[in-house]
Amino acid sequence: MDVVVERDEAACGATVADVFDRAVRSGARTIGLATGSSPLSVYRELIRRHREEGLSFAAVRAFLLDEYVGLPAGHPQSYAQVIRTEFASHVDLAGVSGPDGGSSDLSCAADSYDALVVSSGPVDVQLLGIGANGHIGFNEPGSALDSRTRVTTLTSQTRQDNARFFASVDEVPRRVITQGLGTISSARHLVLIATGEHKAKAVAAALEGPVTAECPASVLQRHLMVTVVLEEGAAKLLGRVRSGDAAGH
Ligand code: F6R
């Protein structure tokens, strides 16, 4: 596991963008995208490189980690729409796929999205954020480390954390479809970005605590190719950060 600590969010974005840039220029065909605040600096930097440095995604298909259940198509906070607004509409991706949170058969939609990710994959590089409770995708604490894409329920903490994107917490959907921890782990390279002291506890548990369903992001410790890019505040509780090998793997 490579752990890189950067001074600020923009530097984190540039470092993560370097990983995607290298992968895409050397032939990656599938990338995995996350939503929320953490990846925004990455998307800004990739858009800049697309415009100014000839970075093309024309041969690349993108797969989303998760989607809210029940938001109408085109709702500004549906993750399909967020990715369009923040990234996809500014670059030349060959396509973007995500779980169908509006399906009348959600469990079937989850299964077919898992099958799509598997048959199109493995995802070459998967971008991840981390929740303050250690979730990745929307795999909340208690999620099986080998779980597949499924319908699940958000914790009240995650709904509170995401309320900033909605008019009130009551508008944050309770249910989501998320790629499972097993699905996410099937990507070749996992890249986690975290900024802010409010993530420090989750980051330390994920990288240095036991591998347990209670901290879903701890599944990263089992993966062979992981890059973690942290802003100083998010790295604050790490006890063993050394260049290139923070978790002793
Ligand atoms: C969203 C996702 C979530 C977020 C996490 C952190 O697609 O996968 O795991 O990455 O909730 O969210 P932010 O970045 O908003 O703090």
Image: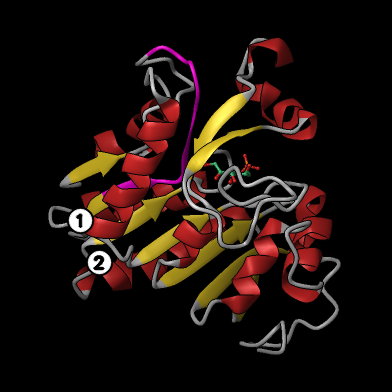
Which stretch did the figure color magenta?
62-72
Find the distance from the CA under tag 1 to the CA under tag 2: 8 Å
The colour scheme is secondary structure
To which residue does mark 1 refer?
Answer: 60
Amino acid type, callout 2? Val
Q: Residue at x 31, y 41 (%)?
A: 112
Q: Is residue 217 magenta?
A: no
Left or right, residue 29 beside residue 14: left
**Residue drawn 20% across the image and 47% down it:** 93
Kindly indicate whether the residue at mark 2 contacts the one at mark 1 (C-beta within 8 angstroms).
yes
Residue in view at x 48 percent, y 48 percent: 179
> Crowding near pointer 2: few (<14 within 10 Å), some, many (20+)?
many
Q: Is residue 155 above or below residue 173?
A: below
Numbered tag placed on residue 24 in the rendering? 2
Residue 51 horizontal side relative to residue 67, left or right: left
Instruction: Indicate which disc, 1 or 2, sits on the residue closer to the N terminus.
Output: 2
Element under disc 1? loop
Report x, y in % for residue 221: 64, 76
Q: Which labelled disc corresponds to residue 180?
A: none
